[in-house]
Image (cartoon, grey):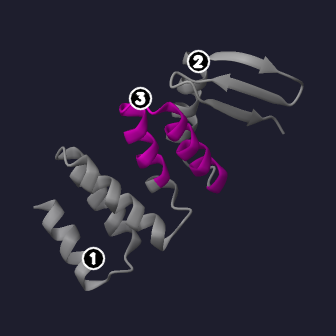
Amino acid sequence: MAIRCYNQAIVCDPQFVEAYNNMGNALKDAGRVEEAINCYRSCLALQANHPQALTNLGNIYMEWNLISAAASFYKAAISVTSGLSSPLNNLAVIYKQHVVFFRSSRLIIFLLADNNFSVLIIE
């Protein structure tokens, strides 16, 4: 029912950013993850820095163990808002669970589980 209502909201107003994000959440909850990803990407096409959509994509990639992709989306969400704790928490989980292999006074490089790496610059 919720998915149908969100879809109707989008039909009424194809620029309604929150409807895409919310429909993505409903689709993900219904196990329709690929469709959810498409909704989050539609949301980002309308508002490139939508922090919830960025975080939601990060969450999906984290569940799929695509750690580098997840970290990228969490960092993007953090860069556009300071009002969400979940991308900060989830990025901390990534960093806690992975090995630091290089550190200087302002730079930390993490080797991630998928053999990619992530860079954190300390301001």
The kind of residue on which mark 2 rests is His
> Badge 2: how crowded within 10 Å, few (<14), some, or many (20+)?
some
On screen, residue 84 versus residue 106, left or right, reads: left
Element type where label 3 sits in the image: loop
Frontmost of labels 1 and 2 is 2
Q: Magenta: predominant secondary structure element? A: helix
Using a 10 Å C-alpha cutoff, classify the residue at mark 1 as few (fewer than 14 neighbours), some (14 to 19) or many (20 or more).
Answer: some
Q: Secondary structure at mark 2?
A: loop
The quarter of the picture where the C terminus appears is: top right
Q: Which residue is mark 2?
A: 98
Q: Which residue is drawn at the image coordinates 59% and 18% (left, top)? A: 96
Under circle 1, the secondary element is: helix
Which residue reaches farthest front?
115
Marks 1 & 2, CB-CB < 8 Å contact: no
Give the spatial CA distance, label 1 vs label 3: 31 Å
Q: Residue furthest left?
A: 1
Task: Name which residue type carries label 3.
Answer: Asn
Q: Could you tell me how far apart the alpha carbons at marks 3 and 2 are, in whole angstroms? A: 13 Å
Disc nearer the start of the sequence (1/2):
1
User: Mark 1: which amino acid?
Assistant: Ile
Q: Which residues are magenta?
A: 54-80
Of the numbered discs 3 and 2, the one sitting upstream in the chain is 3
Above or below 60: residue 65: above
Residue 61 spot, x, y in % from top left: 41, 39
Q: Is residue 86 magenta?
A: no
Judging by the rendered image, the residue that carries numbered circle 1 is 10
Q: Which residue is mark 3?
A: 65
Q: Is residue 85 visible?
A: no
Distance Cα–Cα, label 1 vs label 2: 40 Å
Check contact, mark 3 vs mark 2: CB within 8 A. Answer: no
- The residue shown at (77%, 26%) is 108
